[in-house]
Image (cartoon, helix red, strand yellow):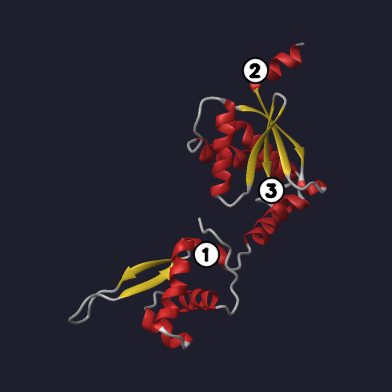
Amino acid sequence: MASTLLRLDDSPRGQIIKLMQRHGALSIKDLRNELGVSDTAVRQQLSYLLADGYIRSTTSERSGPGRPSHLYELSEDARNLFACYCEDLALNLYNELLADQGPAVVGRLLDRVGQRMAKQYQHQIKGQALRERVRSFSQVLDEKGIMSDVSQQADLIILNEYSCPYHEIAANHREICEMEQDMMSQVLNADVKLTDCMMDGSNNCAFTVRPKEEIRILEIS
C-alpha cells in the first residue's frame, strides 16, 4: 500500500506517472528526454515513487552487447490514481435491476452478494476471541483502503469505519448498509448492529459487535 497520496498534477512525480501510463515502461534516459531534467533529478523522483509503491523496476532484454538497461513501470497501486467510475456503474446497474426485477428480487440478490463477500473475507480473519477477530477484520479493511479502527465501550466492541466503500450507492439505497451489517455478522460470527452512519451525518459508521451467546441470554432475560 502506498504511503502517501500522489496528486496527478504537473509536479515531476505526477508527470512521470502520466508518462508511464501513456507509454508503458520507461528508462531514466527516456524520462530525462521527456522531462528535460538531469539523470540525478529523475533518479530522485523515481526513488520517491518506488518507496511509495507506485512504480516498480524491471530490466529490458538486451538487443546487443552490454548490460541490460533498467526500466520503470507502474505498479498495481498506481491504478488508484486514475479516474474510476465504478460507483456510477454500480448505482446505474442497481437502479436498472430495481426497475426491471423489482425490490423483492433485488433484495434476494443483495443477500447473496453479502454472503459471497463474507466468504471472501472469512479466510483472511485471524484469532479465536471475538475482539481478535474484529481487530483482524479492521486490518483487512485498512488494506483495502477502508480506514477503520476498533474501540471498546463497557462490554461492547465497536468497529468504526471512517470511509464508506459504497458511498454513492448507499446514499441512494440504505439497504446497502443493512447488507454490510449482515455481511460483518457472518464474517465475525457475531451479532453486529449499525448504530451510527455517515449517511445520517455522523463522522463515521459505528458497528457494535457482541457474541451471539450474549444476545441470546439478553433476549431470554
Q: Looking at the image, which residue is at 71% across and 14% down?
A: 217
Residue 64 falls left or right of residue 69: left
Q: Secondary structure at mark 2?
A: helix
- Count the labels in the image: 3
On the image, the x and y values in percent for residue 85 come to 63, 64
Between 173 and 6, the one nearer to me in the picture: 6
Res 69 quadrant in image: bottom left
Q: Residue furthest left?
A: 65
Disc 3 marks a residue whose amino acid type is: Tyr
Nearest to N terminus: mark 1 or mark 2: 1
Measure how far apart labels 1 and 3 are at the Cα level. Answer: 22 Å
* Viewer-side label of 2, 3: 3
Q: Looking at the image, which residue is at 51% across and 41% down?
A: 120
Q: Residue furthest top?
A: 221
On the image, the x and y values in percent for residue 3 come to 53, 58
The residue that disc 1 covers is 79
Q: Secondary structure at mark 3?
A: loop
Between 122 and 59, the one nearer to me in the picture: 59
Please identify the quadrant where the C terminus is shown. Answer: top right
Q: What numbered label is drawn on residue 162?
A: 3
Between 143 and 177, the one nearer to me in the picture: 143
The residue that disc 2 covers is 213
Measure how far apart labels 1 and 2 are at the Cα level. Answer: 43 Å
